[in-house]
Image: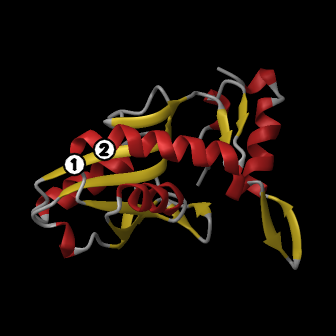
Amino acid sequence: MKSYDYTTRQGILELSWDDFAALARQLAEKLQPYHIQAVVGIARAGLFPATAVACSLRTELYPARLTRRLYDQVVRETPIWKTPISDEAAGKIVAVVDEMADSGQTLHMAAEAACSLGAVRAVTASLVAHSWADPMPEVVALVSDALVIFPWDRQVLLDGQWQPHPEVQAALALQSRPEDKP
């Protein structure tokens, strides 16, 4: 299976940990008017902004895992559930938070699941979203069509050595090949 289509990205946006903190604060500020009572964080990387938002809003965090990946590699066209949303979402206004909205499908599926569990409302939110996300999250800190490199994706531990993330390296290679762009 082919990974995400990185040829559609326009430019490169490397986020530092300070950038992440600033965007997470913006996300929390934008969610605050919704009177969020619980945060559902989409594991894995969505737990970074979800944790920051839950701490900022002083609410509970409930991790869930809905993914196209297995062992950090994209292996499915559509996300599947690995860890369901907690029953604690029932009766609450929840924010369903992920780090990136590419297609918008993961957040949409998670929000539907939260509502089916009895959440009063499920507000979808992402740290970053691409303009083509459909559905677009209700709350977004940054909309960018760049190849976004999050601080946790810069390097990974491979064979005992810190190395550039293979998926990021492949995406960067596509960015430097204009003949591959649509």
Residue pictured at 82% horizontal, 27% vertical: 177
| Label 2 CA crowd tier, 10 Å (few <14, some 14–19, many 20+) | some
Say which element carries label 1. Answer: loop
What's under tag 2, amino acid-wise? Gln
Q: Which residue is mark 2?
A: 32
Say few, some or many: other residues with alpha carbon within 10 Å of mark 1 (under 14 / 14 to 19 / 20 or more): few
In the drawing, does residue 112 fall left or right of residue 134? left
Residue drawn 31% across and 64% down?
Answer: 59
Q: Which residue is mark 1?
A: 35
Extreme residue toward the right, this view:
161
Query: From the viewer's perspective, is residue 97 above or below residue 60?
Result: above
Question: For numbered disc 2, what is the local secondary structure?
Answer: helix
Residue 105 in sight in this render: yes
Q: Disc 1 versus disc 2: distance between alpha carbons?
A: 6 Å
Q: Nearer the viewer, residue 4 or 127?
A: 127
Question: Which quadrant, please, contains the N terminus?
Answer: bottom right
Could you tell me which quadrant the C terminus lies in?
top right
Determine which of the numbered discs, if any, sits on residue 120 in the image.
none
